[in-house]
Every structure is written in structure tokens, then in C-alpha cells.
Amino acid sequence: MPLMLKRLTYTGSTLRPRSKEFKAEIAADLKNQVCPLFAEGKFKTQTYAVFPFDHVVDARQMMEQAAHRGKILLTP
């Protein structure tokens, strides 16, 4: 809803048709420019819940209910 209120546009794209070299360049840029921001605490992920892998059904049910905000993680 906040996107609609601010008249923002959310778009995405696929890298499937791009060359391996292009994808490697993007990966390197992310590693060099974005990952440090996470390490510095400037970016943070929103984790809603963490489930052990043997509770994957519970995680799936939570995801299907769409009542969460943030990531649902599975751990070994």
C-alpha cells in the first residue's frame, strides 16, 4: 500500500538472456558496493521468522497466509 500512496513504480527484470560476463560484473559490483553497506549496518534485512528446516511445512503455511512482513528463513 505505501508504494501506491507515494505513486512509486516497482519494476523488475530478468538476467536470463544476459551473458555470463555481464552477470559476473553485476555480482562483483554487488559484492563491492552493496555488501559493505550490510556489514556497516546501513542496510538490514527484515527477518520475520526463522524455522529449522524440519519445520518447512510451518514456514510454508506462514508464507501462504501472507500475514508476515519480512523474510521467512529456513535453517539447517
Image (spheres, grey):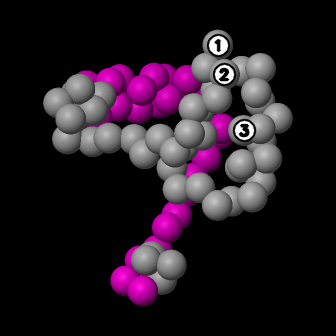
Q: Is residue 3 left or right of residue 40?
A: right
Q: Are marks 1 and 3 in contact (CB under 8 Å)?
A: no
* Residue drawn at point x = 59 percent, y = 55 percent: 68
Q: Residue at x 79, y 47 (%)?
A: 61
Q: Which mark is residue 59?
A: 3
Residue 74's x, y, as percent? 64, 27
Q: SS class of the residue under badge 1?
A: loop
Q: Which residue is mark 1?
A: 76
Residue 52 shows which numbered tag?
2
Q: x and y percent of residue 55 in the render?
A: 76, 27
- x and y percentages locating residue 27 in the rendered image: 42, 26
Q: Label 1 vs label 3: CA separation?
A: 13 Å
Question: SS of the residue at dot 2?
Answer: strand
Q: Is residue 13 magenta?
A: yes
Vertically, is 16 above or below 1? above
Q: Tell me if residue 15 can be seen.
A: no
Please determine whether, in this image, residue 12 is positioned above or below residue 40.
below
Is there any visible trace of residue 64 in the rendered image? yes
Whether label 1 touches label 2, CB < 8 Å = yes
- Span colored in magenta: 5-34
Mark 2: give few (<14), some (14-19) or many (20+) Cα within 10 Å.
Answer: few
Mark 1 and mark 2: span between their CA atoms?
Answer: 6 Å
Q: Amino acid at mark 3?
A: Ala
Mark toward the start of the polypeptide (3 vs 2): 2
Mark found first going from the N terminus, 1 or 2: 2
Depth check: 50 or 27 in front? 50
Quadrant in which the C terminus appears: top right
What amino acid does circle 1 point to?
Answer: Pro
Q: Residues within 10 Å of mark 3 (few under 14, many from 20)?
A: some
Q: Position of residue 13 (x, y in %)?
A: 57, 53
